[in-house]
Amino acid sequence: MPLTRVFGRSFWPLVIVGCIVVAASCASSSSSSDGGVLVDATNSCPMRSAVTDGPLSVATTVAPITSIVANIAAGTPTIIQGIVPEGTNSHTYEPPPSVAATLEDADIVFINGLVLEEPTKELAQANARSGSVICELATTILPEDEWIYDFSFPKEGGKPNPHLWTDPQMAGDYAALIRDALTAADPTHATQYAENYAAFALKIDAIDQAVAQATATISEDQRQLLTYHDAYAYFARTYGWTVIGAIQPSSFEEPTPEEIADLMDQVTSTGVKAIFGSEVFPSTVLEQIGKETGVRYVDVLRDDDLIGGPGDSDHSWLGLMRFNYVTMVEALGGDASALKTLDTSDVGPDTANYPQ
C-alpha cells in the first residue's frame, strides 16, 4: 500500500501494514476487558479482524477525528457515529448512558487518547462487544518522549497535551492509522480506503506546505501565541511558533490574578500584535488583557469544533485548519494567501453523524 507522503514518524505506517497482514493474530494476542473489547498494553490500536456481517460500524469522539475518519471511509458503507458534541469541552465531557448503545454496536472506537477522553474510553471498555477494538490515535503515533507537558498540562498532573490534530503532519499520521485499522476490519473495501487516504494525504501535504509558506511571511518575533486553550503546542513545535501562554489552566478554572498579571507582562514584553480567544468559549479575561495592553483580541479560533454545521462545505478538519491558520497568520501581520487558495473539500461525501 504505497504512501503519497509519510507524515511525521516514517516507521509507523510500515508497522501497521505488517499488522494488517496478520490481523487475526494481532487481535488474538490481545487480552479482553470484561466488556469484550480488545486491549493490549503494548498496542494502543490493536487491529480488529475482518467483520463479516453488514457494514463496518465505527464510533469516534471529537469532531476533527470524526471528519478524518469520514474522509478515509468516503464511498464505503461504513457507519460513523460521533460521540462528543461539538462545542463541548472534550476534556471534561461525561458521556450520557445513552452513548453506551453506540459503543456497544461499534466494531472500532477511534479516540484521540493521551488521556483526553477517559470517561468515554471507560464506557467503551465496559460496553463494547467481544472482538471490537479501541484505537487511541495520538497515544499510538507519538512516542512518549515526544509528549508535550506545559503550563496547561503539567507533567505532575499526568496528562500530556493531547491536541495532535491541530498539527497537519500529525493528522496525517492519524489518517494512515485510521486507513490501516479500517482495512484490517473491512478488507473488502481496502482499495477504496487506500485511494481515499492517498487523496487526503495530498490535501494534508498542501496544508502543510501552505502553513510553512504563510509562517515564513511573519517575522520570527511575532510567531507567538497566547490563546484561550492550549491547543497548538504540537503545531508550534512543528512550524517554529512559540506558545507564550493559555488562559485556561490545567484545572480548567479561571486563572488567578497573579497568572493574569504574568500573561499581561508576557504580552507587553513580547510585543505580539494579537491574542486569540475561542468562539465556543468566550474569555472575558483575554478580552481584558487585550484592552489593557492595547493588543487586538481575536475571539474566533476553534480546536475541536468544526466550522459551520454538518453538511456545510467547511464543516471538516480541512476547513478547520484553513480557518484557524488564516486567522492566526493575518492577525499577526503575515500573508495567508497560500492558505486561502487551498482546496479544503472532503475527498468524498461525509456521511458521519456529528452530535451538536
Image (cartoon, rainbow, N blue to C red):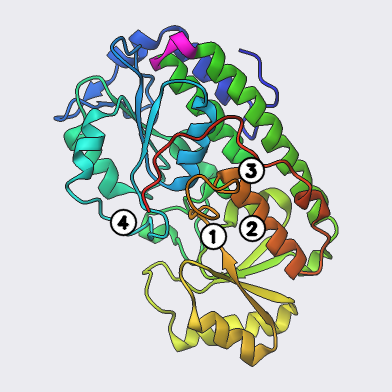
Q: Is residue 75 above or below residue 141?
A: above
Q: Nearer the viewer, residue 301 or 79?
A: 79
Please name the predominant secondary structure of the magenta segment in the image: helix
The kind of residue tagged 1 is: Arg
Kindly identify the residue that appears in the image at 32 percent across and 29 percent down.
41
How many angstroms separate mark 1 from mark 4 (CA)?
17 Å
Kindly identify the residue that appears in the image at 67 percent across and 51 percent down.
322
> Along the polypeptide, which appears first: circle 4 or circle 2?
4
Residue at numbered disc 1: 302
Q: Nearer the viewer, residue 142 or 329?
A: 329
Task: Point out which mark residue 168 bears.
Answer: 3
> Along the polypeptide, which appears first: circle 2 or circle 1?
1
Task: Point out which mark residue 324 bears.
Answer: 2
The kind of residue tagged 4 is: Tyr
Kindly identify the residue that appears in the image at 52 percent across and 68 percent down.
279
Q: Is residue 279 above or below residue 179?
A: below
How many angstroms separate mark 3 from mark 4 (CA)?
25 Å
Whether residue 95 sits left or right of residue 210 in the image: it is left
Which residue is outermost to the front? 311
